[in-house]
Image (cartoon, grey):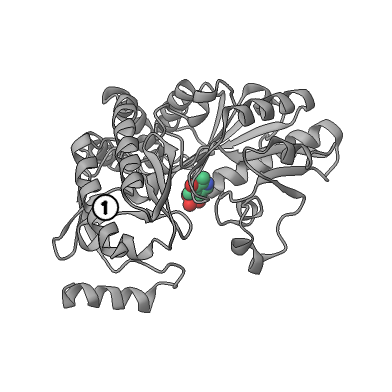
Amino acid sequence: MSTEMQKYIDEAEQALLHTYNRYQVVFDRGEGVYLYDTDGKRYLDFVSGIAVFALGYRNEAYNGALKAQIDKIIHTSNYYYNMPAIEAAKKLKEISGMDRVFFTNSGAEAVEGAIKTARKYAYLKDGKTDHEIIAMNHSFHGRTMGALSVTGNPHYREAFEPMIGNIRFADLNDFDSVMAQVTDKTCAILFETVQGEGGIYPATEEFMRKVRVLCDERDILMILDEIQCGMGRTGTMFAWERYGVRPDVMAVAKALGCGVPVGAFLMTEKVGANSLVAGDHGTTYGGNPLACAAVSKVIDLFQEQDVLSNVKRVGAYLEKQLDGIAAEFSCVEARRGVGLMQGIVLDRPVGGIITEAMERGLVLINAGTSIIRFVPPLVITEEHVDEMISILRKSLQACEA
Ligand SMILES: *Cc1c(COP(=O)(O)O)cnc(C)c1O
């Protein structure tokens, strides 16, 4: 590292609150699926800002749409209509089959909105305020108090207790554990269709179907967090499409704006007509013209570039190559994932391997202490996978030695 970059890092540590143990690199710019640091060193990016920058960096059509919107209008209030929000909401309805959209600034806020929706829906039925939500162990839904309350990792929650209350935890893919938490106060069952931070655990089809039936029978809302696994990452626009069931409410963010901070919670007409009304919820920035111009263009580009086909093809290839790595290295215990959301499970902490890869020009990220996660831009090719595998192999060899 140059003394110049070291100076930037020292400055960062003087100014920023230390809430991340950051990798020792200052990124400067991006080009396609590559990042460059301030020394000009190139890195293949298999993180994409944690499943955000799906279309690659410096995508001309995307950048152009944002520049045009900046020169028109960046922000107005949600007390008025604006064209980008209208366009984005229409397109989001179309690709999701959901009926109502509320734009937020982040994933956590989309989860907050989903929680408020569920509580209001139940409140309108019986006028009570003691409803419960079932969430999953090892889940991750964000860092705000509501989202934290449904995050199934006690370590994240402990210092910030008390949580919002009336949250019960069950295990993903263990339907009996969900049944054990159901009471007549249950208003929602919330989970990630594919758990991300918790270690890349896809929900099983049996679990999805049983939860759907249970929710239908008892008028409980099925809320899916598609913030990381949605927007094409698993080869369908939303991960739940693979299971033939539809949620009542869903949260999206991350790749939704491909880098412009934006999220959304969506719901069916039935939920929309029986939950939040004027005055119940709002946001200053959420769904502003700049953010929605990004959403609108992202959805167009997904279609024009047939991103889903690419994810299916390259995702299958990535899966095969990672299975090869798992067979080759005794420290790799398993591979899990769907499409371009993959993880390999190691018998040791992965921090050293990720640092090794970084030195060799590959950006990777962990999920928990012992899992390396692969969430590259959705426009990567087989050649990029080969390049990644070759660096990964050397990094694993260096750490096994
Ligand atoms: C990232 C993430 C969130 C939180 O999103 P933020 O934009 O960081 O608030 C919530 N749920 C899942 C599944 C995520 O991956």
Q: Is residue 164 left or right of residue 296?
A: right
- Residue sitting at x 26%, y 41%: 56
Q: At which x and y percent is residue 300?
A: 32, 26
Q: State the residue at coordinates (70%, 35%).
A: 175
Quadrant holding the C terminus? bottom left
Badge 1 is on which residue? 392
Residue at the spot 49% in from the left edge and 46% down from the top edge:
196
**The residue positioned farthest toward the left in the image shown:** 40
Q: Which one is in front, 196 or 392? A: 392
Closer to the camera, 334 or 130? 334
Instruction: Work out whether 25 lies above or below 175.
Output: below
- Quadrant in which residue 351 is drawn: bottom left
In the rendered structure, the answer to whether residue 236 lies left or right of residue 8 reads right
Across and down, in percent, residue 88 comes to 42, 29
| Depth order, front residue of 47/257 | 47
| Disc 1 CB within 8 Å of nearest ligand 1 atom | no
**Disc 1 residue type (three-letter):** Leu
